Amino acid sequence: MIPDWETNHLILSDRLENDFPTLFADLRSLLTGVTIDIIPGTSDIWCRDFMPIQIDGNRFCQFRYNPDYLREYQHLITPPDKCRLPFMADCRQEPIVLDGGNVVASRSRVILTDKIYTENPSIERPRLRSRLEEVFQAECILIPKEPFDTVGHSDGVVRFVGEDRVLINDYSAVDPGYGTRLRGLLEKKGMEVETLPMFQENARRKSGDLQSAVGLYINHLRVGNVVILPAFDRLEDEAALEKVRQIMPDARVFQLPCRSLAEMGGVLNCVSWTIKTVSQE
């Protein structure tokens, strides 16, 4: 698998500039030296979810993008043919339902939430996990999704900052029971666990709708040694920025206002598809 810190190419939906022109311009300004391309003909801005997964420098896998939270919004699903870009010569199709936002990877490990099981009920759990490990050529670690989270993506819960080191939300003031369970599971797998500030506003969680992602600094953009954190006009913004600079001292860390974007249900990792350019293999 290709971890965030090995990527060098950022690809965005063609809708992002129209919907969030200031954010789009700021990303271009901050990511000087990073190749940025646009996916034409997309149906929404959340390209992390509908684009293929890069397995290694030459191989991609297109999973079936049919999340249960979009069953009544089929017009928001970008067709698979729009997701295959010219440089993706080796892109296999996989019938498993899986959003890219539920794939958080280091070189040898992939973290997914157990939402993968409910979205593929016809596949026995051991067989599903085995197949994912075969496709990814990596160990798959299943974590529980956040309670009441409709989307169930791991990139709103955890991110790798090293091969065996992860950053998770600080759930101590939001859901300490879940946080303890999550930490214990990851530490049992031999991982060093650090926490990143998190806060919850009244609109953050509600049953039956997409939750606001305001408060999720974990859903940041990383491409190579550049990290861009969301900011929500809260005191926690500075604490999150300082913590990431402490955890990733060799990275260039920036912060961009993302409240309007987050109120739609996702933040910076959700709107970015980052890969390692094949030509530089």
Image (tube, helix red, strand yellow):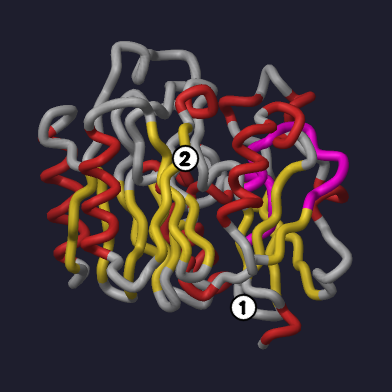
Point 79% across, 51% down: residue: 38
Residue type at mark 2? Leu
Question: How many marks overall?
Answer: 2
Residue 144 falls in image quadrant: top left
Residue 259 shows in the view = yes
Residue type at mark 1? Asp
Q: Is residue 33 above or below residue 111?
A: below
Point 41% across, 64% down: residue: 252
* Residues in magenta, as a range: 38-53
Mark 2–mark 1 distance (CA, rounded to whole Å): 30 Å
From the image, tell me which residue sits under label 1.
Answer: 56
**Circle 2 SS class:** strand
Q: Residues within 10 Å of mark 1 (few under 14, many from 20)?
A: some
Point 39% across, 57% down: residue: 253
Q: Position of residue 11 (x, y in %)?
A: 70, 55
Q: Closer to the observer: label 2 or label 1?
A: 2
**Circle 1 SS class:** loop
Instruction: Please tell me which residue lies in front, 197 or 125.
Output: 197
In which quadrant will I find the C terminus? Answer: bottom right
Point 43% across, 22% down: residue: 212
Q: Is residue 148 above or below residue 244?
A: above
Left or right of 214? Residue 151 is: right
Q: Position of residue 266 (x, y in %)?
A: 50, 33
Residue 54 shows in the view = no
From the image, tell me which residue sits under label 2.
Answer: 256
Instruction: Please tell me which residue lies in front, 54 or 113.
Output: 54
